[in-house]
Structure formats: structure tokens, C-alpha cells
Amino acid sequence: MEITILKVVKADHFWAIETFGTSMSEETRKFLQLTQQMNDFFSMDQAMCVPAQGQLCAGRRPDDKLWYRVRVKNILHSKSGPQACCFLLDYAKECLIPCHWLREAPPQFMQLPWQAREFHLYGLQPTTLTTDELTFVTDTQPCDRYDTAANEYVNKLVDESCGARVDVHYVDSNGVSHVKLYLRRTTNTVCVNDDLVSKGYAKEDKEEPSTSEGEESPVRRRNKVPSIGERLLQGLMPQKWEEPSRTQAQFTSHSPSGRPLSLAGHQMSALGLTIGDGVAVKGDIPPKPCTMLEKATFPEFIKQYLETENFPAPSKVQAYCWPAIMRGRDLVAMAPAKMGKTLAYLLPLMTQLAQTAGFEGLPEGNGPRSIILCPYWNSARYVYDQCWNYIADQKSTKVLLIFGAGAEDDQMVPLINGCDLLIATPRCLLRMLEKRYTNLDRLCHLVVDDADTLTEVYTDEIKSLMRLYGKAIADQPDRSAPRQIVLMARQWTAGIESFHRAYMTQPLLVFTSKVEEAVYSKVKQIVQVVHSTQRYTQLLGLLDQLETGGHKILVFAGSDAEAEGVAQ
Ligand SMILES: Nc1ncnc2c1ncn2[C@@H]1O[C@H](COP(=O)(O)OP(=O)(O)OP(=O)(O)O)[C@@H](O)[C@H]1O
């Protein structure tokens, strides 16, 4: 089959489409007709379809105003309204499409297999050079992934070629064709599989597929269009855009522990949703909570983990965070200790990282796709240990833990080799960035765990990290990859207030504790300055007054001893 290579993902992994021309297959002919039909069918007068993550639909690409078959990857909020980050299924490209340019596609447009096909080079295992620490003898060893030199080499071969052909060896159960790739050059034709072996980037590995689909031809591929039932189960059914009823609220808040001293006059446009379970969600278009584990749209390896843990249901914070984080929303969630905050962000994060297809727009390099910041080494270690519950069977997601002064040089090699998820304390991460062992160029998901502590105790470090991240983003004006910031905390603090204003885009705020929500949005604070000797008298007077109104009263004290005194 003659192909046009659309994108080289790695040395042995690429996307391509059958070359259009006189010798193209019947399916490719049908595709060209379908493109014409779609562009005749869709118009801007038709009703928009409201996108959900993973949904298949038709979208009008702003660049050329043509209609394409797309998969919605996530929804981003921009000044010009919601934009869907879409994967063009026939061209293996990502682009941003305004949500009102998306249309539900009738089944006749979705039946023809996607034309962008995924290919893997057949029969290869990557190799790398290793040096024995004792003898200094260098040897080529099999490894898990191609190094940057191999990726660059294949990219260069493709750039310099004037045509490509594949011999399909087999098609696996995911529809990926395992092939021998031949590139035509002006003087000769190169078999890339053989070339990678001869150049020492790979060794031959003729392992046969374990599936029985060895003889399947690529044209027998089927689009994975979920049935209506499946879509309902996966939460992919289009939901209605509900225009949030905006409320103006005024807050005044005070606390000796660094909470905002005064938010008086601060006006917040928010959808204040206090739901029956005592959870309050603020922010535009909050997704529906996931109240049953079976309804969570996690991949198999996470579902299996949840089954083994035998949790009865998602905790409150998980119910609200899972769908929001999966949709790519910025989020701040407040919940007391031991409410399952770690899994509230870790499971959707691992899910997104496992979908490598979402990150095509990232620059090459070794920077992590996600970072979890923790204040202390033991909290970082706890999160890292939790990760092992799901990554044991998920080798494609590489997780690294770094912390501790002085140990940086031991951590240099794994960092330079790159990882998907980096769990770090802020100071250590800054040192690693200064030494250029890693970078923030590919960072898509930043989680600040224990954000109340981090933003208060490590304010300068967090500011420096955010400055570096801002610069990395600014250096990539065409970047289309996701960008998400998630803050997890026990309580709302002045540090979180400043952080979310400075760096987050229309975040959802989730309060699972009534006290936190009250501090944030409902308490009218009246400050009375009294001499310390009169405090108890004043307090008792207030309590007398309030008691007659049948109010519940919460008294905060500065220490255990003082709390005892108040109680007595
Ligand atoms: N849905 C669930 N149902 C029952 N137990 C859960 C659920 N999710 C997590 N847990 C368990 O609850 C315990 C506490 O979880 P976790 O450490 O994430 O809490 P946390 O809110 O982050 O606490 P902290 O604020 O102290 O860090 C863990 O042992 C975890 O396995």
C-alpha cells in the first residue's frame, strides 16, 4: 500500500493515510466522496452538538472552514467562548474548534473507517547503549523505548523521502497495523525496519502477535463508534449546555492563620451549586458528579484496582473531581483529611496519561507530561507509592519520584531519560530545573497537592515554578496540547486565593466541607476589637444573643488550652 506519512510519533510508530491517486483503494475513493458529502451536508445554521470528552462528531476547522470527522479530547475555556480540542480522525492532527462549530454526525458519515491509520514497525525491539559501571565497557542492550537520536533519525528519513510504501504483517486488536516501511529517496529505497537494526537503534524481535487476527487486512478495520448504550454508559452522550445562573456574592473573611483578611467588595460570578450531599461547587458548567464506581469512565487497569480495593463508592471529593479532571478543567478541591483526595486527582490523571494520543502536539524532549507537587518528602513518597497500585500493569506510564537535597545527582539519569509523571517537592524540582536535568516544556497537567501548605510555606518556590512554566508555554505559541492545573487542599487559604487568581483558567471550586464553604461564601464577618481581658465576657454575651435565634455556633480557638477555656 502506498501511504502518505502524517506524523512520526516515535521511531517505530507513525500515522499515515493511503496516498490519493489513480491506484488508491475503493475505500479511499469512498472517503473522498464522503468528504464532499459532509461539506455539502453541514452548515452553520444547524444546531450545535454539545461536546463531551471522547465524543465523535463533525467539526468545522477554523483554518480552512471545511468539515471533518473529529473526536473531542477536552474542552477549554477561552475569552472567545468554549473551544473543543479535537483530533481529526482522518488526518491524525489536533486542532481547536469553537464548540458552536461542532455538529452531531449522522451514522452514515461515521461508518467508513477513519483514514488516518496507526502503524508500528514490525519485528523490532529498541536498544540503547549502556556502560558497565565497573569495567566501563559499553554494550548495546534491549530497552523499552527508543531514544531521541532514533526518533530524530526516522523523522529525518521521512522528511528526505519522496514516497512511502508499507507491507502489512498483521493488524492487532486495536486496529494498529504492524508493517515493514519502505521510504523512496531520489537515489534508492530504504527499508526503515532493516535500517534501524543496521544502525544499532533496534534489534530484530520476531515475536508473533498473540491475537488470532494476523491475517486481517487494514481495510477490514472498524471505527470504534460506541453504540447508544455504550455512549450512555461512558457518559459520552451530548449534554445540554446549561447557561449558569450567575449570582453575585460578597464575602468578608478573617482568620489569624493567613486566610484572606477581607474579600469585602470582591464580586464573584459563580454558579453556586450546593448539592444535597452537602458539597458546594462553584464555577461555570460543572460536570455531573460520578456517584457510582461503575459509572466512572476509567480504563480497565484502574477499574481492576478499584475492584480489588472494594471501595463502596467514590468519596464526595472523588465524585466531583473525577469528571471535572477528566474533562481537562482547572480545579480547586477542598476536603478534610483522609477523604480520598489523592485518588480524586490521581485516577483521572493516570487515565489521561495512559491516553498517549492526547499529547501529539507536545515538543520532543524529556520533560514530564504531568507533575504532582507535594510539600514534604513523605507526602511525595505516599503519592508515589499510591501510583504503583495502577502502574504495575501499565508500563507505558513512567513515574518518577524526586525529593531531598543532595540526592540530585543520583536522580539525574532517570530524569534525563524522561518520564510521564514526576512527583516532586518544590525546592527539589527547582534545583533539577536549574541544573537542566528536566524542563517544563511538555507539562500538561500540574497538580498541587496539599496546596494550602504549599502555597503558604513555599510561596517563593511556587511562584518561581509558575514563572518558569509560564515561560515554557509562551515559547510554544502554537501549542495545542492540554494545560490543566489542579489544586487539592484541606482548607481555603489566602495562598490558594492568590494562586487561583494568578494562574488558573475558570476553575471549578469544590467544597466538601460546610465549614470551608461557609468561610468562602456565606459567613458575614463582623470584627470586634476588644481587650483580651474582656474576650470571654464579650463572647458569652454574643452566645446569649445568638442562642435565642436557634443558630448553630462554631467557636474557633487558637490552641487546645484556649478551646478548653472556651468550653468551660
Ligand atoms: N472511595 C473510597 N472509599 C473508601 N476509602 C477510600 C476511597 N478513596 C480513598 N480511600 C482510602 O482513604 C484513605 C485516605 O485517602 P487519602 O490519603 O487520599 O486522603 P486525603 O484526603 O488525601 O488525606 P490527607 O489530607 O491526609 O492527605 C486511603 O487509605 C485510601 O485508600
Image (spheres, helix red, strand yellow):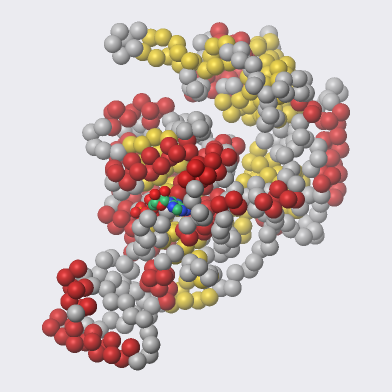
Nearest the viewer among 307 and 496 is 307
**Residue at figure coordinates x 57%, y 55% from the top left:** 292
* Observer able to see residue 349: no
Residue 519 sits in which quadrant? bottom left
Across and down, in percent, residue 444 comes to 49, 44
Give the side of residue 153 with respect to residue 65, left or right: left
Residue 151, percent across and down? Answer: 54, 22
Q: Is residue 266 above or below residue 202?
A: below
Quadrant position of residue 93: top right
Vertically, is 135 above or below 231? above
Left/right placement of residue 34 relative to residue 92 reads right
Which residue occupies the foreground of this view, 300 or 364?
A: 300
Seen at 68% across and 48% down, the residue is 55
Query: Between residues 416 and 467, which one lies in front from this camera angle?
Result: 416
Q: Is residue 511 above or below residue 327?
A: below
Residue at 68 percent across and 59 percent down: it is 239
Q: Position of residue 449 (x, y in %)?
A: 38, 51
Q: Position of residue 23 (x, y in %)?
A: 85, 22
Q: Quadrant of the N terminus?
A: top right
Residue at 48% x, 69% y is 278
Q: Quadrant of the C terminus?
A: bottom left
